[in-house]
Amino acid sequence: MSTNAPQPDRALTPTAIDALTMDTTPWLSCEDCFERMDIYVEALARDGSHDDAAMAAHLRGCPACAEEADSLVDLVTGSGT
Ligand SMILES: [Zn+2]
């Protein structure tokens, strides 16, 4: 793909739609969230400014997964027991 020039006449490319819908709907399912959690938490532990919009959105809206992620972070960073 040649990516440098935006396409002025196409109002909504799939990429643009992705960007628009990403931080609102649909959030990841808990299943998707769990699948990505290891990677997300490890990246977070390595780099506190790591950001994954879809994961962050799910964790914000889902206390169960947020709790799971929390304890995983403790585990990975060794700051737990
Ligand atoms: Zn969840």
Image (tube, rainbow, N blue to C red):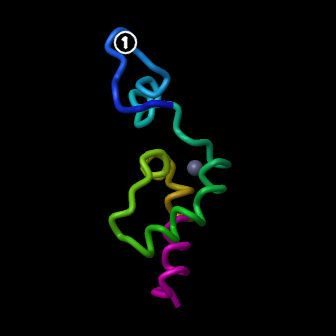
Dominant secondary-structure state across the stretch colored magenta: helix
Residue at the spot 37% in from the left edge and 12% down from the top edge: 11
Residue bounds of the magenta highlight: 69-81
Q: Where 60 sits versus 22, above or below?
A: below
- Name the element at disc 1: loop
Residue 75 shown in magenta: yes
Give the x, y percent position of residue 19: 41, 31
Q: What residue is disc 1 on?
A: 11
Does residue 3 appear left or right of residue 8 in this picture?
right
Residue 39, percent from left and from top: 57, 64
Position of 61 relative to 47 (above/below): above
Around disc 1, counting alpha carbons within 10 Å, would you say few (fewer than 14), some (14 to 19), or many (20 or more)?
Answer: few
**What residue is at 50 percent from the left and 87 percent from the top?**
78
Q: Residue furthest front?
A: 2
Say which of 34 and 9 sits in front. Answer: 9
- Residue pictured at 55% horizontal, 56% vertical: 65
Tell me the kind of residue under disc 1: Ala
Q: In this view of the protein, which residue sits in the foreground, 23 or 11?
A: 11
Residue 55 location, x and y as percent? 49, 51
**Percent coordinates x, y for residue 43 in the rendering:** 48, 68
Most foreground residue, 9 or 21? 9
Residue in the foreground of this view, choosing between 78 and 19: 19
Q: Is residue 37 above or below residue 2?
A: below
